[in-house]
Image (cartoon, grey):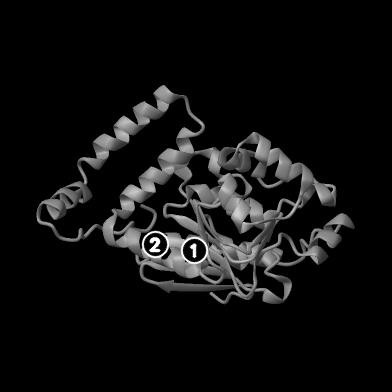
Amino acid sequence: MHYQDIIYQVDDPVAIIKFNRPEALNAFTRRMLAEIRHALAAAEQDENVVGIILTGEGKGFCPGMDMNALDAISDGNNGSAQSLAEFKAQPGDPELGDNFQVTYGYLMSIRKPVIAAINGACAGLGLAIATMTDLRIVERSAKFSTAFSQRGLIAEHGISWTLPRLIGSGNALDLLWSARKFTGEEAKSIGLAEKLVDDGDALATAIDYVRSLAASCAPKSLQVMKAQVYRHMNMELGDAMRETNDWMAASLQRDDFREGVRSFIEKRPPNFERVKAAD
């Protein structure tokens, strides 16, 4: 597949999806969003891939939608004439339910870890998508803003659901109302970033993290744990416990469990199976 607005690379066990419009700090276009979705589906189906990294080329992660595209939308032209049929894809596990089939919620149902390596400007839709990844590794000088209120918009693209769960309702409303700029340092202090790294180190840190998971953890376990966390955020405790008990019983029957025990006893690295396509 020929991508124009992203770079897609796989180096077992890592897939890297790099937003590639550095002249615009990687502002999204409709084509880029379609290419990202297509590449995520490809990475999800690739047995060589244990974890997926989203990052930006150059000095930005993503400042949101391209302003020219927003200007066209404000004038009543949504750019629908551009055909993107070749990038049609359905990433994510449909068995997790309809909650994860709306707009960008599919990111949370992808069967593998998705990590944002945030290397610069991250605002608007770029920030909303970052909040739907599983972990955020952030450089100290990265600049953030929700941006929506200063464009006459609301909290868009699911960020009203994700942001309070990450940083609490008060912090979320502060960032949404004020649309103020803040750095990677504050992102870490309020819980938006799981890891804070020096400038230029986000991608390498994310790669090392995925490699460490691949070396010691069962990919199927990572898949099920991700599904548990996001599904159970929407469930009563008893329902979550009953589903966990069912999934735990299934895990005890898998080869991964036997390999995990044997490798510990034999004091050797485990040799777990990778997640198969559409598994």
Instruction: Specify the amino acid type for callout 1.
Output: Ile
Please tell me how many numbered marks the rendered image carries: 2
Q: Which of the 4 image quadrants contains residue 38?
A: bottom right
Camera-side residue: 12 or 141? 141
Q: Secondary structure at mark 2?
A: helix
Q: Distance of mark 1 from mark 2, alpha carbons? A: 9 Å
Above/below status of 58 relative to 69: below
Q: Secondary structure at mark 1?
A: strand
Residue located farthest toward the left when viewing the structure as drawn: 266
Residue 43: percent from left, percent from top: 45, 64
Above/below status of 21 relative to 273: below
Q: Which of the 4 image quadrants contains residue 271?
A: bottom left
**Residue 216, numbered label:** none
Crowding around mark 2 (Cα neighbors within 10 Å: few <14, some 14 to 19, many 20+) is many
Camera-side residue: 81 or 199? 199
Can residue 119 be seen here? The reply is yes
Residue topped by disc 2 = 210
Residue drawn where x is 15% and y is 52% of the image: 264
Residue 16: percent from left, percent from top: 49, 68
Instruction: Specify the amino acid type for callout 2.
Output: Val
Crowding around mark 1 (Cα neighbors within 10 Å: few <14, some 14 to 19, many 20+) is many
Residue topped by disc 1 = 53
The reply to whether the C-beta atoms of the residues labelled 1 and 2 are less than 8 Å apart is: yes
Residue 159: percent from left, percent from top: 65, 44
Residue drawn where x is 30% and y is 32% of the image: 246
Can residue 155 be seen here? The reply is no
Residue drawn where x is 19% and y is 61% of the image: 269
Above/below status of 193 relative to 215: above
Residue drawn where x is 76% and y is 51% of the image: 180
